[in-house]
Amino acid sequence: AQKVTQAQTEISVVEKEDVTLDCVYETRDTTYYLFWYKQPPSGELVFLIRRNSFDEQNEISGRYSWNFQKSTSSFNFTITASQVVDSAVYFCALSDNSNSGYALNFGKGTSLLVTP
Amino acid sequence: DSGVTQTPKHLITATGQRVTLRCSPRSGDLSVYWYQQSLDQGLQFLIHYYNGEERAKGNILERFSAQQFPDLHSELNLSSLELGDSALYFCASSVVTGSSSYNEQFFGPGTRLTVL
């Protein structure tokens, strides 16, 4: 069975602080995909990144970076120099060829509040 | 703008009623996924259609059904509504069905259903 755990329910930081959102996953498949989505207060789901199970390279995109470690089944997300506009709920998701046929299995989300 | 449209944006109805939510995928996308976001259950996968055919089911209640039409738009039908069905319903589209070549799912803005 597949499972995504985001242990941090809420995080509050002051602007310009760095913050890391944790994600731990479980899957029996050798081929799978990991995602991060952002849900701002307006409610839409914004795709941030996809990683496949064969690519463990870390990725950096501006202030965002992702650390994928198969050995610990983790796919953590770091925001450097956080800004107020980063305030949102962030979801980690897993997709594999389980009985849901590559549908997304989301974690419970981490609510990030960045204050000035 | 993801290119996925959902109507209506908001829907308020009473217990016991039936409603239909509509989703138009991005141009060229053959897959439509439906997800429900509620306070209790978080974001969970309901059902997946590919080119008119049902491909996978998640935690979809028997009171709920969906279909995908020849023009590829999809409808999610919710009947005998209960208070607990109040949620944000998202659809997402992608180019292909589950395969080794995974394609991102692009989410619509969601339909917020309130059952009174």
Image (cartoon, rainbow, N blue to C red):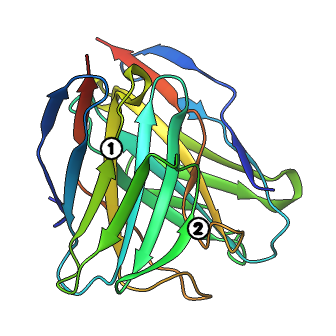
Using the image, name the chain to which the residue with label 2 belongs: A
Q: Position of residue B77 (x, y in %)?
A: 30, 52
Quick check: marks 1 and 2 in contact, CB under 8 Å?
Answer: no
Q: Amino acid at mark 1?
A: Tyr
In the picture, the quarter occupied by the N terminus of chain B is bottom left
Q: Position of residue A20 (x, y in %)?
A: 59, 33
Distance between the alpha carbons at the discs numbered 1 and 2: 25 Å
Of residue A67 and residue A38, the one placed in the foreground of this image is A38
Q: Quadrant of residue A40?
A: top left
Vertical side of A33 occupied by A81: above or below: above
Vertical side of A50 occupied by A97: above or below: below
- Tally of numbered discs: 2
Q: Amino acid at mark 2?
A: Arg
Vertical side of B34 occupied by A17: above or below: above
Same subunit under labels 1 and 2? Answer: no
Of residue A60 and residue B40, the one placed in the foreground of this image is B40
Q: Position of residue A85 (x, y in %)?
A: 25, 30
Residue A51 — which label? 2
Task: Tell whether A43 sits left or right of A33.
Answer: left
Q: Residue at x 49, y 54 (%)?
A: B46
Mark 1 lies on residue = B89
Assign a secondary structure to mark 2. strand
Task: Tell whether B44 sits left or right of B93.
Answer: right
